[in-house]
Image: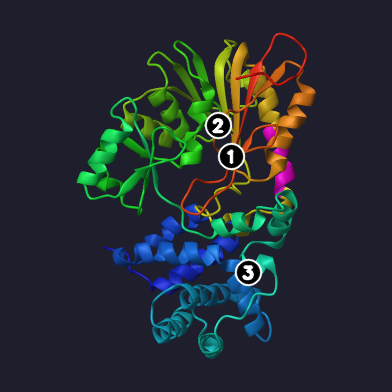
Amino acid sequence: MAARTQPLRVVAAEVVTAVLDGQSLGQALPSGQQRVAPSDQSALQALSFGSCRWYHRLNAELTRRLRKPLRRKDQVIQSLLIVALFQLRHSHQADHAIINETVEACRSLGRRQLAGLVNGVLRAAQRDGEPAPDAPDERLSHPLWMTDKLRHNWPEDWESLLTANNQPPPMTLRVNAKRTDREAYLEELAQADIPARATSFAPYGIQLDQPCPVDRLPGFNNGRASVQDEAAQLCTTLLDLQPGQRVLDACAAPGGKTGAILEQGPDDLSVTALDDSADRLPRIRENLDRLGLSARLAVADAGATDQWWDGQPFDRILLDAPCSGSGVIRRHPDIKLLRREDDIKALAEEQLRLLSALWDTLAVGGRLVYATCSVFPQENHRIIQRFLRQQPQARLVPIDAPWGRDTGDGHQLFPGNGSHDGFFYACLVRSDSNHNQAVTS
């Protein structure tokens, strides 16, 4: 017997409430989609993502419109109002339909006594229009601590960075170099009536004019292409993969970079992919199986080398370190609600721990590429600075590339409208001497 479906706005309000309570959209949305009609699933995703993306701006407006805050037990009504304000400000649905259906959703949520309040707040919002935000964090819809930190770290770029975070991300593909080439795949996309263009920096990247379901992509199920942002694809251009090398992808899930290494490297690479979550390992295997590729997979804390390393040094290591995700907020707008300022210090210590531990597994003359999807210097070039002070055998390799900003200790990419995500890369080589210095690439 099919489960009874619930009204779209009811479920959207519950998804937003779950995020405010600490769940990610990735955790909260799948169960929500099971509770709405199949025809409403894409609308639920749009409402949930949009409400989180614009939450800080919408909540500032809502706070002004409420005479007093709603009680904690009525948080779901607060979320319902956020969803409705998002629609009033950012959708093409008729205002009266939004208001009427939101009032009915309030009743469906068992809060009939608040239906009049909901109706009054939304009719005032419809009548008065959106008030001018008082501060940059409200205008750009980010938490105050994040706005202040980025304004301090990047005084010339913070506003464009936050603006880009509020734009829907492009859909970018990585062509499987073992099965086709970019020009041929662009032609296949054109024949399938999917407009696309080559990316500017990633040699196997293709950006679609509009996102589309993967089952429409030519040969996707047969591994001819994968979905991966252009910035994430750049790791293979820095690893300098050579025949016969032992390669470690240290924090591998969901496996996109592992696949890129195997696709674009020589056929005789020996690749190990680690992740500390047994739940995520099957996703890596599924992606590699689809691509027709193989690697040694293991569940392990990359920093606990005594538990997984066989003592044979690696020639190349990719450390895509756990981070704040501040460079991929447009793809994961719930980061604005889930991340806290004091998370950054803890993440920085974890990044340095992993980098220091993995260094001992790198062969003399080997190369380690450090990467994050963060735009906070504390997680990026300052980690490299700290590491170089601690490790006399480390040499920084200057990145000679037309992308990103040279920080002196790596390249920082910012998210751009219609372009790549925010990312950081640094390249290190291991010397047998004890003097840090940059080396030529």
Circle 2 SS class: loop
User: Can you identify the residue that label 2 sits on?
Assistant: 401
Question: Can the viewer see residue 35 in this picture?
Answer: no
Left or right of 140 in this view: 212: left
> Which quarter shows the N terminus?
bottom left
Chain part drawn in magenta: 343-351
* Mark 2: few/some/many CA within 10 Å (<14, 14-19, 20+): few
Mark 1 and mark 2 residues within 8 Å of each other at the beta carbon: yes
On residue 245, the disc is: none
Question: Can the viewer see residue 302 in this picture?
Answer: yes
Residue ID at (32%, 52%) = 212
User: Can you identify the residue that label 3 sits on?
Assistant: 139
> Quadrant of residue 54 in the image?
bottom right
Amino acid at dot 1: Gly
Circle 3 SS class: helix
Residue ID at (55%, 19%) = 316
User: Can you identify the residue that label 1 sits on?
Assistant: 404
Question: Distance between the Cα atoms at labels 3 and 1?
Answer: 27 Å
Asked whether residue 48 is drawn in magenta, I would say no
Disc on the earlier residue, 3 or 1? 3
Disc on the earlier residue, 3 or 2? 3
> Quadrant of residue 97 in the image?
bottom left
Provide residue 148's location: percent of width, then percent of height. Answer: 73, 58
Colour scheme in use:
rainbow
* Mark 1: few/some/many CA within 10 Å (<14, 14-19, 20+): some
Circle 1 SS class: loop
Q: Is residue 307 above or below residue 232?
A: above
Nearer the observer, 392 or 298:
392
Amino acid at dot 2: Ala
Amino acid at dot 3: Arg
